[in-house]
Amino acid sequence: MNQDEFSKIETAKLLKSLKSSSIDEATFLDIKSLIIGDGEDGPIDRAILGLSQEDEFNFLCKLMGTTTHLVPLVQTPFIKGEYIVPDFLARFQPGCSISGGYSKSESRGYECLIEVKSTEKDRVKVSGSRLKKLRHFAHQFNFPLLFAVRFMQFEHNAIWVIKEDENPSSSSITIKFDHWLNQIRHVLWDEYWYMLPQDIRFRSICDKSPTAEAGKTTKYGVQTSLIIERDDRHSVLYGSQAMYLSAFFEAFALKEAEVKEIDETKTEILLHPTLHICSMVDMLFRLSNLPIDSEGNTLHDASRAVSHTEDTWFSRELIEKFAKELHENGFLDFIGFTDKETHIDQWRRFGGQVN
């Protein structure tokens, strides 16, 4: 890394720290202009974006709850050599809940080094001296090397691929967008799919009356109840339960199909899902993006959220509690990323222990 590159990264780290603090956007932009000058922000913005993807990866690891350690590594070593320090030292201890019902306590854990990348294309290729130096560092400490890549063209979805450096003798490694379905993310995060039945529908009852109980606010007033229907089954939810489950189902991109006025203040909205399948990671990611501003922009900022994960109302445990109840009532199914035997074999390779 040359001196200009070093200065760019250090400046980006400083600005990212400011951005993740409590200052408002206008103040941040003023400070940024003073530090780097007008018209010089392109390379710095790209560096900040890269650092922000590290924060998003950290954020998702926290939410998924299978990472016991995730330590950012200082990448400007005192003793220089023919190596590059990866972004994180990590330890995962996942269960294998969808395929075998195994808990995280049945894993001995998996330690590794992780290099985080992001791209607006459909693939990332790491090769040449950079790959050689990353491998050299991993080899010296006897840790496997992983690459975590964020595909930016899907900004409203958590499209991350986690891929092993499986063949250290190869001259390059390519991480593609479609690898997210068949690589190791679902193993390390103990992830699976939520799937809605094709015939499911929802009815949201909203009330504009000033006496309506507090709940989710919509353009039709305060939501007072949520009705879930399929075939001859239905479930009516009220209050906070209706609000939480509405947020859960928003991950399936609900669309208004019909709006009916019940009386002067009450409205019934018929909602159909436009997606019938959603990964657990996407569910948590979308929930973290639910708050919006007056112009419809999400307020999520991984740089800030990563230090306030404990303050969020949602968690993996809460989502799984909702999902279990919905499944028992016939409103939700679970699907693994691979077949059961393949998943268990992969889990064993990353520390799982099957008696």
Image (tube, rainbow, N blue to C red):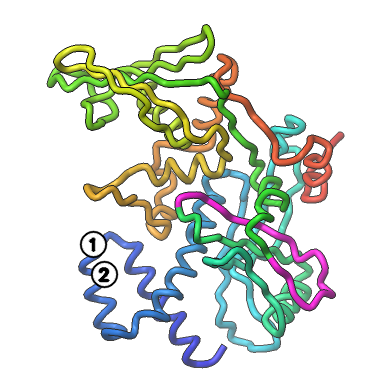
User: In this picture, is 222 found above or below 30?
Assistant: above
Relative side of 154 to 298, left or right: right
Could you tell me if the residues under marks 1 and 2 are in contact, i.e. CB atoms within 8 Å?
Answer: yes
How far across and how far down the image is residue 278, in percent? 56, 38
Q: Quadrant of the N terminus?
A: bottom right
State the residue lying farthest toward the top: 232
Task: Quadrant for residue 323, please give it.
Answer: top right
The residue indicated by pointer 1 is 24
Q: Position of residue 203 (x, y in %)?
A: 37, 19
**Residue positioned 50% across, 92% down in the render:** 3
Which residue does the numbered mark 2 point to in the structure image? Answer: 28
Q: Mark 2: which amino acid?
A: Phe
Residue 113 within the segment the image draws in magenta: no
Q: Which disc number belongs to residue 152?
A: none
Q: Nearer the viewer, residue 269 or 5?
A: 269
Q: Which residues are magenta?
A: 156-174
Q: Quadrant of residue 348?
A: top right
Q: Is residue 110 above or below residue 238?
A: below
Element type at marker 1?
A: loop
Residue at position x 59%, y 66% in the image: 116
Question: Local crowd at mark 1 within 10 Å, few (<14), some, or many (≥20)?
Answer: few
Q: Position of residue 181 (x, y in %)?
A: 68, 48
Type of the residue with mark 1: Asp
Task: Give the x, y percent position of residue 165.
Answer: 76, 66
State yes or no: residue 159 in magenta. yes
| Residue neighbourhood size for the residue with mark 2, other residues' Cα within 10 Å, grouped as few (<14), some (14–19), many (≥20) | some
